[in-house]
Amino acid sequence: MFNEFNVLKGNRLFLKSFEKSGIFDPSGTLLQKIDWRNSIGFNGKKYNDFPKRQILVESDSSFVVGLSYDYENIEVHLDIFSIEENTVERLKLNSKTSYGDLSFRSANSGNIIDPSIEFKYQNEKILLSYEFSNEIVVYDHHDKSLKFIDYNPKLTPKRVIPSKIRIGALEEIQNEINSYYEQVAFYRPEWDSKSKHYFRLSSRTIFF
């Protein structure tokens, strides 16, 4: 299933699907396969996985940044795949308060119903932001550092109050998610080149 693409230098395309990704020329010829599964993982063993979201960064040495979901422990990780070295490095996002504590598990199917996460590359940095939390995570690939930004909004709460329900029926979970939207929902940061500032919208929803 094809889901996303990025335009690279030289009119090349980075195409992504659920299980595979690669770099193609405009005629559709595969130039380079991005083989996450057969790379060497952060634990020294075969990675044998595939991130849910990916961004290819072209710098001195090209690499792919992947957003990996651990649904068993309800966590999110940032995995860095070096194309040249065929290795994956994992960075801890400490996503418990902004993601894990705000997710639900269906009592019927066992599936996770989780907040959305915005994931983008801008100003030579990876930006990650959460739907129900003001927290923003910035990955700077030049010095390989993570920066956690936790600011204080003046018009809304910083994040929603976690539900007391973690496992429930779908109708019950939907009511709790509606309660989240009534408190606050955040959108991704957007860069304004004139003011040299990021702007971020948030909203409260009234259900009737």
Image (cartoon, rainbow, N blue to C red):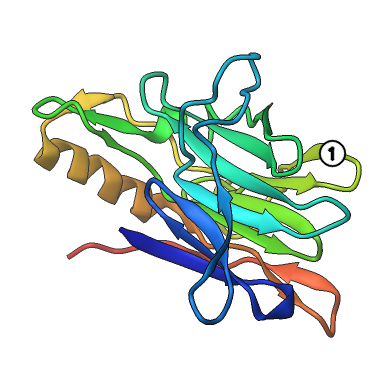
Q: Residue at x 57, y 48 (%)?
A: 34
> Which residue type carries mark 1?
Lys
Q: Is residue 46 left or right of residue 69?
A: right
Q: Residue at x 19, y 44 (%)?
A: 175
- Residue 18, percent from left and from top: 37, 49
Q: Quadrant of residue 165?
A: top left
Residues 95 and 37: in front is: 37
Query: In the rendered image, is residue 153 in sight?
Result: no
Residue that carries the numbered disc 1 in the rendered image: 144
Q: Residue at x 36, y 33 (%)?
A: 103
- Up the image or down, 154 lies above or below 195; here it is above
Q: Residue at x 65, y 14 (%)?
A: 44
- Residue 190, percent from left and from top: 66, 71
Q: Is residue 197 left or right of residue 206?
A: right
User: In which quadrant of the rendered image does the C terminus lie?
Assistant: bottom left
Residues 41 and 113: in front is: 41
- Residue 123, percent from left and from top: 80, 66
Label 1 Cα neighbours within 10 Å, binned few <14 / some 14-19 / many ≥20:
few
- Residue 107, percent from left and from top: 13, 25
